[in-house]
Amino acid sequence: MPWLQLKLHARPEQAETIAERLSDAGATAVTFQDAKDQPLYEPQPGNTPLWEQIRITALFPADTNMETLKQRLQQVDTPLEGWHVQPLADQAWERICMDDFKPMRFGEKLWICPGWHSPPDAKAVNILLDPGLAFGTGTHPTTALCLQWLDAHPPAGLDVIDYGCGSGILAIAAARLGARQVQAIDNDPQALQSTRSNAKKNRLEDKITTQLPDERHPARCGLLLANILANPLIELAPHFSGLLLPGSPLVLSGILAEQADSVARAYQPWFTLTGMQEQNGWIRMEGRRKRSAGT
């Protein structure tokens, strides 16, 4: 199947908005690269830096109307610099993916490594994960924030729920960092298949189970991770309170900065919120299940 490859430049504060518009317009993959050969040294735990100028590469089916797409993108208040479209064969895109995706470190010891790279540190906590179509490889700030939290708070011996598991990246990270069992939940059967495949690749089939939200009631857990969106998070607050053991930690992500107050209000009846971390306009929120809250 032939494809169209789009490349354009963006500043860091525009990159996520443009990437979201590309995905909404039908892009099957979107990647960020440095457009100026600016080095990014190993970040301190809690930081996910972006380059000063970013080259965005997106893959579209060959029948996509790129002029219409360009007009939609121009609604973002910035000129579209470096706009370039070219046809691309399957094998060429596979090669570009392999060139683009390098091992990434999150915090002090957690690495995400594509299968064609050797782990930079064999003694680190290494997760093998190849870039998929839309389920997450750690490049988005919402996922990176959760991975950094896990690195700083290894869930050793805990039962964990990854709600909205996508690729299973957080479930796998939790298992690699010592979780006893992980329940990966998603409303997309394809995401569950992706999670199972990645768990097998990392030899974690015995630690990670998958299910649809309404398939069965999950066992109560000692840590719940939910990297989804603000509105579903708000609706799920009472449900999450029933999934977590009293006093247990909760980590929420996928929240825009302007949505943080609304999400916090929704969780206050059941949870004591203990902190927030912002990266590129996205918020990670953490807290603990109140011991005196209702079921």
Image (cartoon, rainbow, N blue to C red):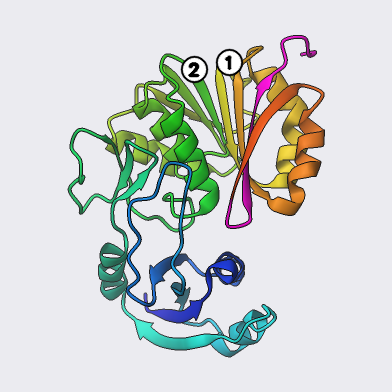
The residue carrying pointer 1 sits among few (fewer than 14), some (14 to 19) or many (20 or more) residues within 10 Å by Cα, namely some
Say what amino acid the circle numbered 2 marks.
Answer: Asp
Quadrant of the rendered image containing residue 139? bottom left
In the displayed structure, 166 sits above or below 181; it is below
Q: Who is closer to the viewer here, 140 or 163?
A: 140
Left/right of residue 269 with respect to residue 192 in the rendered view: right
Q: Which residues are magenta?
A: 279-295
Q: Is residue 257 above or below residue 183?
A: below
Question: Mark 1 belongs to which amino acid?
Answer: Ala
Q: Residue 233, percent across and down?
A: 71, 39
Q: Which mark is residue 159?
A: 2
Magenta residue check for 289:
yes
Q: Given contact means CB atoms under 8 Å apart, are the residues at marks 2 and 1 in contact?
A: yes
Q: CA distance from mark 2 to mark 1?
A: 9 Å
| Mark nearer the viewer, 2 or 1 | 2
Indicate the quadrant containing the C terminus: top left, top right, bottom left or bottom right: top right
In this rendering, would 157 be left or right of 214? left
- Residue 291 location (% of width, % of height): 72, 10
Taking the image as shown, residue 182 lies to the left or right of residue 281, namely left
Disc number for residue 219: 1
**What percent of the width, then of the height, locates residue 172?**
39, 33
How far from the left and from the top, in percent, is residue 43?
Answer: 39, 50
Q: Residue furthest top?
A: 292
